[in-house]
Image (cartoon, grey):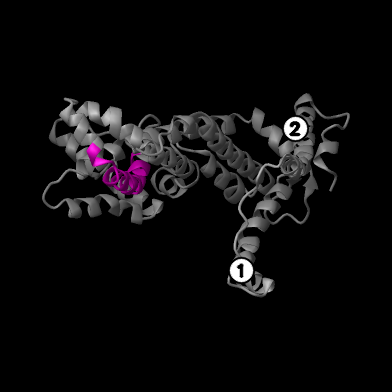
Amino acid sequence: MAPLDFCTFEPERKAIDMAFGVGLVLAGMAIPLWPLLAWTQKEQERRLGIPGPAVQERGIFKQWWLAWLLLLPTFTILVVFLYYPGLDTFRLSTLLTFVGAPRSRFVCVDNFTGLLTDATYLHSLGITFAISAAIVVLGLSGSLLIATLAYQPIRGAAIYRVLLIWPYAISPAVAGIIFFIMFNPLGGVANHLLGLVGIPRLNWLSDPNLAPWVVIFASVWKQMGYNILFYLAGLQNLPKDLLEAAAIDGAGAVRRFFAITLPLLSPITFFLVITNMTYAFFDIFGTIDLLTAGGPSGSTSVLIYEIYKIGVSSGNLGRAAAQSIVLFLIVVGLTILQFRTTERNVTYGG
């Protein structure tokens, strides 16, 4: 198979292909230079007399190979089920290959550049960002509010906390079934409650404007127990003397929350933003498949579901592999951006 950075410069290639090739060349140069740069930096520190990390004590294994032998089962599982499929996805993304087809054809970066002109894919990309942002914002704000209320010293608080955390134990598919029963247009609980107050029935799952919100609420409810668990742990570890001093100084409950509690919870919030973003991009497939199957009119067809339709339903493995890599890079890029822009505002310690 010809290297990607060479095939993108063939005479018949478009400008976007050549730009992609330049990016591949730069990435290919950066990968081998990274360890060389790290070695150069350490060598410079050694010459300047800068002390390095403390030497660790010898482990409990006298034979060096014994530790590797014990790690072999874990390494085997990781290689077979994680690393090899990941590398093979890159190979498939450069091929025109279908399920059951006897032969595959090398197409260079066509599977990637074709996404830029695919209206369905670009629409799915926008839907993904909108739904994911709503899940993160509504999920974290609602979880923090509920955790703050559950933290209050009330009778039966332990029981309430267990019940609040329980939804996290179910799978996204089960969450989809529960919300399908609730928002079923014919006999759902939501339409029954609307009928009690004289509001006409709504087509929750067949209306392009309502269906995304059902998916969002189902996903938020599914993940809320996870968020509440961390926020409760954070609230229990807040310095009580600081809150009491603020109360003595005349600060009200709302002011104490925004001036003390919220900043001290910023490390937990920072962690939950990353985990909820990953959940919103990757783990809502089961909820969407049971609720709307990507409809109506593609209003809930997020990228992970689009990959399923292209790769499994249509059998276009090459295009699905390219979309998988793009989705992975988007999440990695957003995570790096989150670290770059938000971590500096995180308050560690009291």
Q: Compute the Cα span from label 2 to label 1.
A: 36 Å
Tell me the magenta residue range: 217-241
- Callout 2–callout 1 Cβ contact below 8 Å: no
Q: Secondary structure at mark 1?
A: helix
Camera-side residue of 344 and 139: 344
Furthest-left residue in this view:
155
Q: Secondary structure at mark 2?
A: helix
> Where is residue 179 shown, x and y percent of the image?
31, 46
Looking at numbered disc 2 in the image, what kind of residue is underneath it?
Gly
Camera-side residue of 284 and 133: 133
Q: Earlier in the sequence, mark 2 or mark 1?
A: 2
Mark number, residue 71? 1
Camera-side residue of 69 and 183: 69
Please determine whether, in this image, residue 297 is positioned above or below residue 60: above
Looking at numbered disc 1 in the image, what kind of residue is underneath it?
Leu
Q: Which tag is nearer the camera, tag 2 or tag 1?
A: 1
Judge whether residue 236 is colored magenta.
yes
Camera-side residue of 311 and 20: 20
* Residue receiving disc 2: 23
**Quarter of image, res 44:** top right
